[in-house]
Image: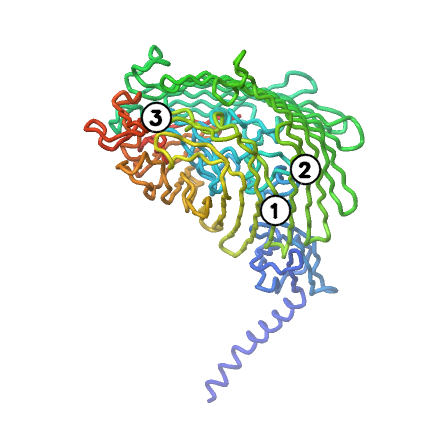
Amino acid sequence: MSTYFCGMLKIAPIISLLFCFRILCSQNSGILSGTVHSNGQPVPFVTVGLKNTTYGASTNTNGYFEIKQIAFGTYEVVISAIGYAKQSKSVTISNSKPSVALSFELKENQSNLEEVVVSGTMKEVSKTESPVPVEVYTPALFKKNPTPSIFDALQNVNGVRPQLNCNVCNTGDIHINGLEGPYTMIMIDGMPIVSGLSSVYGLSGIPNSLVERIEIVKGPASSLYGSEAVGGLINIITKKTANADKLSLDVMATSYQEYNVDAGFKYKPGKKADALLGVNYYNYQKPVDHNNDGFTDVTLQHRISVFNKLNFERKDNREASVALRYYYEDRWGGDMKWNKNWRGTDSIYGESIFTGRYEVIGKYQLPIKERIFYNVSFNSHDQNSYYGKVKFYAQQKILFNQLYWEKELSKHSLLAGVAYRYTWYDDNTVITQTNDTINPKNKPNNVSLPGVFIQDEIKFNCNHKLLVGFRYDYNEAHGNIYTPRVAYKWTLNAKNILRLNAGTGYRVANVFSEDHAALTGSREVIVVDNLKPEQSVNANLNYVTKFYKESFVLGIDMSAFYTRFSNRIIADYDTDPNKIYFNNLNGYAISQGASANIDLVLQKIPLKLLVGGTYMDNYKVENGTRARQILTEHFTGTWALSYEWKKMGLSFDYTGNIYSPMRLPLLGPLDPRKEYSPWWSIQNIQITKKIKCFEIYGGVKNLLNFTPPANSIARSFDPFDKGVQYNSAGQIIATPNNPYAQSFDPTYMFAPNQGIRGFLGLRFKI
């Protein structure tokens, strides 16, 4: 006992010293606490630190933090969280104020969630504030799977599918949520450039180097943009000269011997003008027939596109710009023995298309106090083509003028304007022929379409916003056209947004300029009656939510859509295998479904995942009978997985898509080909190495080497039907040389014919 007592006496001074030291420290240190909120909601897992010190903490699920034993002094408190902008405050902890409580209100990151969009309302607004759901895609996504054209690049977007419509010339259109290309409006810088005749051939050759972003609206947009925006719109926004690189170059080649060059150059033509020049050149001249059907698997192409954009400096930062684009393409596909000497003959089959096109786009803000803008565009499209021995010459000129006024009034954001569109179209088909027996000549289809529109965006409070719009157009042939729309946005909180959009649509079809199947193959085209304009009623419900955790950020974007058509114009392949009937549907057609996009970013691992899926149900009801729409899948999915080794300057990308079966056009009950396509997928990998201002990239496309069936082209050995026999009713009959009673037909098409291939490229920019 005495030994223990003596030991305690020895350490007592040490204990007393430590106790005194603790008292002294506590007298010279304090506590910092606080809360972090965003739009009234607590934000968990926020990093809180005192700059240039080791003091730190993170917020709990209630957004509360506390840091103890901070030495007296003045500090800068810095807080940060994924998806939010950083904030800092100065704080002093002293003997007179040893305990300090702070409150922070975080704002969502401008570079991520506050992207500026224009397509939804025709005005620049942040993406989260827009009452119309707008999807934004930057070149970063398309570089994960580099392609030679915008048409090919859109295969990475969920719910958007580039559809090839012909096995021979590989022309196609863009489907949004299962609706064919004519229901999608394609714009460049907000101007309707690609439509009608160019909807088939005008989507290639837009220089990727000049694209700043692509905005996609899925659903009704007719009240602002007119009759073609029934299914949605794709707005290609080109770079502003101030944001563009001085020089950019992207050169790519594939093992198929495809060569693509994309170049951009910024220059200054005058003191108050900046200009941006872009050039796209694509060349593929090696015929390939891997499926041994005697026809080219891939269309040979030689094209060049030149785009020049000028921005002018004006007083009070008023806008003024003009852009010009020229496009030329020579493409052909067909018999491997074909050359231009056989163009238009019935000896060796080939489809040869020469396309010449130029565009002018201008925007000017009037020099007055009110925000009034004048937009103008003009495009001329010339097509000189032969589909075997069938000649198709067509010309189209479209002039578009628009004057609109923006006004902010208290809780109202007004937009009003007038528009005038003039279309001149002529071809050598029955569509433009007259019934004048004395002087039968082709008469151009001249369509004048004046219109007015008004839109009011009403902000009730921070959480509720209503948009109402109305458009009136007058068509010379069809009279008055009314297209109203309404949009409602409900911000539940900082991380949850609900949008509802509804409207009507109206469209006048031009069969030969929009449906390639009307020209290719040996089917006879029959337009039953004078085609009436299509009309539709459509709605879209969109919900966006985000989850911010300590280790990841997860964004989910979900939509449900519905469109009901009356007077729908559908190509009928089923009634007669020798004919294609075009007529207004005696009934109605439905396009409905749901889609979801998931965007995941891991904080500690440099891994990003973007995955999306869309379910679609597209059908027609005629005379009480329901039938599934041709060439439309029930399900489509896309993904992009990216991993980055920053120290090595390497990045890895794995992209792909998957499609469910779609109904295909058959040539009668004896056709041996399957009525439905299989499940199919195109998958790609890429590795990129960054070296200062250079990027070297390479990889493999179509990893699974998926291609359509080898017999996709019916009777490719007899493209002029010289061995086909008919009965007295004009129907093809089965013979020993034609046991399946088929005619030549290349429209059995659902996937690209290009198999697995490697690619290598180089990017350079200053």
Check disc 1 and report the residue beneath it.
502
What percent of the width, then of the height, locates residue 191? 61, 29
Mark number displayed over residue 269: none
Q: How many marks?
A: 3
Q: Earlier in the sequence, mark 1 or mark 2?
A: 2
Q: Earlier in the sequence, mark 2 or mark 3?
A: 3
Check disc 3 and report the residue beneath it.
298
Q: Secondary structure at mark 1?
A: strand
What percent of the width, then of the height, locates residue 274? 64, 21
Q: Residue at x 50, y 18 (%)?
A: 427
Amino acid of disc 2:
Arg
Q: Residue at x 61, y 62 (%)?
A: 63
Check disc 2 and report the residue beneath it.
471
Let me know if residue 399 appears in the view.
yes
For the residues labelled 2 and 3, the Cα–Cα distance comes to 43 Å
Amino acid of disc 3:
Val
Q: Earlier in the sequence, mark 1 or mark 3?
A: 3
Question: Which one is closest to the eye, mark 2 or mark 3?
Answer: 2
Q: Tell me where residue 146 sits by quadrant.
A: top left
* Up-down relation of residue 14 to residue 3 (above or below): above
* Up-down relation of residue 144 to residue 93 (above or below): above
